[in-house]
């Protein structure tokens, strides 16, 4: 049966609808808690307007279910984008409010920081201070992104591609969360420029999540031409894997490397985690550039091999003086 024509069974469609509802409910719950915390910390009810992104999920879900075959878009997830449009501004307001509080109260002592790091897990949520609330929401946001992506319909992705995407999300999340740990360092905790730059990098890196970076185009057959060259419908300068790697370098590993090198060289933020993640960013950038070169070289080599197999230049003589000119076409 042709891949573009598959019967749709009611059970499969019902399952897709259920998964779509569950994933959006998870995003909505975390978004509501994030906005509620902003309203509590800042004390202005106008910030409830941040829920507009979550409210639009009620419109996005029926549109997605109606307009897509597999209940999810191929290259871009509007659901994840709408969720981030609520959570990212919330985290910005929470962190900026913390920054203003630190400026008013001064830098806490090392003993105060030690006590904050050992708050019992069983403590009442109402007793948590704004800094612990912000940290908790930032960490749970990345967990919710992974769980939500796992719950939502796969769309055109295979299980292998979905597992690759989820593992990529986990790796991205660990790197992103370290930026917020940097804000707690005594050297930069009241440095507004460093905090704003870190929040900007955090926002920039999260733009990877609405994209399905593991999605690939279906291979299309190439037709041999009379002169031995091959013709295909894929005229892109780079493969989808190369684009995915370039996006990862440009959206996360490259900017994060520059940010961490600045903190180490200019702000003197030197600790084990900073050194580890800086070395990790250097290695990842080098490996990703190497992989891009390998993919592009393979992409350029395959058409040349196909051309050599299909035809040789007409009139070229072989070792015995005979013409070796031939074509793949019969």
Image (cartoon, grey):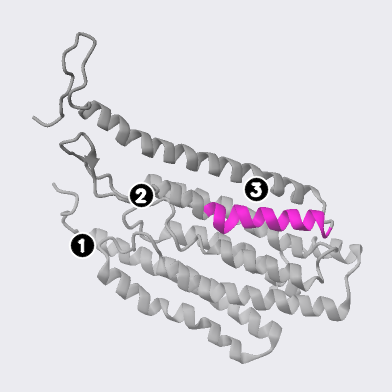
In front: mark 2 or mark 1?
2
Is there CB contact under 8 Å for labels 3 and 2? no
The quarter of the rendered structure image containing the C terminus is top left
Q: Secondary structure at mark 1?
A: helix
Q: Which residue is mark 3?
A: 281
Mark with earlier residue (3, 1): 1
Q: Is residue 252 magenta?
A: yes
Q: Which residue is mark 1?
A: 10
Residue 328 percent across, percent down from the top left: 15, 29
Marks 3 and 1, Cα distance to the nearest angstrom? 47 Å
Marks 3 and 2, Cα distance to the nearest angstrom? 25 Å
In front: mark 3 or mark 1?
3
Point out the residue furthest to the bottom here.
45
- Give the class, few, some or many, for how many residues have Cα within 10 Å of label 3's Cα (few <14, many ≥20): many
Stretch of the chain drawn in magenta:
248-267
Identify the residue at horizontal 72%, vertical 72% (top origin): 124
Residue 256 location, quadrant: bottom right
Give left or right: position of 147 versus 311.
right
Q: Which residue is mark 2?
A: 216
* 326 versus 3 height, above or below: above
Identify the residue at horizontal 91%, vertical 67% (top origin): 109
Q: Secondary structure at mark 3?
A: helix
Give left or right: position of 196 versus 64.
right
Give left or right: position of 102 versus 320.
right
Residue 146 percent across, percent down from the top left: 51, 58
């Amino acid at each position: 049966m042709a891949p573009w024509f598959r019967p749709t069974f009611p059970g499969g469609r019902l399952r897709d609808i259920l998964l779509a509802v569950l994933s959006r409910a998870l995003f909505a719950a975390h978004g509501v808690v994030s906005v509620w915390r902003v309203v509590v910390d800042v004390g202005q009810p106008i910030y409830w307007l941040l829920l507009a992104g979550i409210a639009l999920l009620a419109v996005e879900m029926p549109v997605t279910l109606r307009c897509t075959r597999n209940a999810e878009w191929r290259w871009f997830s509007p659901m994840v984008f709408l969720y981030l449009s609520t959570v990212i501004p919330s985290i910005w307001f929470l962190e900026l409010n913390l920054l203003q509080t630190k400026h008013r109260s001064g830098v806490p002592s090392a003993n105060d920081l030690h006590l904050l790091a050992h708050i019992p897990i069983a403590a009442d949520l109402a007793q948590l201070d704004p800094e612990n609330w912000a940290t908790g929401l930032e960490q749970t946001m990345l967990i919710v992104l992974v769980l939500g992506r796992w719950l939502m319909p796969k769309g055109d992705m295979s299980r292998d591609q979905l597992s690759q995407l989820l593992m990529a999300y986990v790796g991205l999340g660990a790197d992103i969360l370290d930026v917020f740990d940097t804000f707690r360092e005594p050297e930069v905790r009241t440095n507004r420029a460093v905090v704003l730059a870190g929040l900007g990098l955090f926002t920039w890196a999260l733009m990877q999540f609405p994209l399905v970076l593991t999605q690939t185009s279906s291979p299309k057959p190439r037709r041999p031409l009379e002169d031995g060259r091959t013709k295909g419908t894929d005229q892109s300068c780079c493969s989808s894997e190369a684009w995915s790697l370039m996006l990862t370098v440009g959206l996360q590993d490259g900017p994060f490397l520059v940010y961490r090198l600045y903190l180490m060289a200019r702000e003197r933020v030197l600790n084990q985690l900073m050194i580890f993640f800086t070395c990790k960013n250097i290695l990842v950038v080098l490996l990703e550039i190497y992989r891009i070169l390998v993919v592009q070289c393979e992409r350029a080599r395959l058409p040349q091999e196909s051309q050599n197999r299909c035809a040789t230049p007409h009139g070229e003589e072989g070792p015995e003086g005979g013409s070796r000119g031939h074509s793949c076409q019969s």
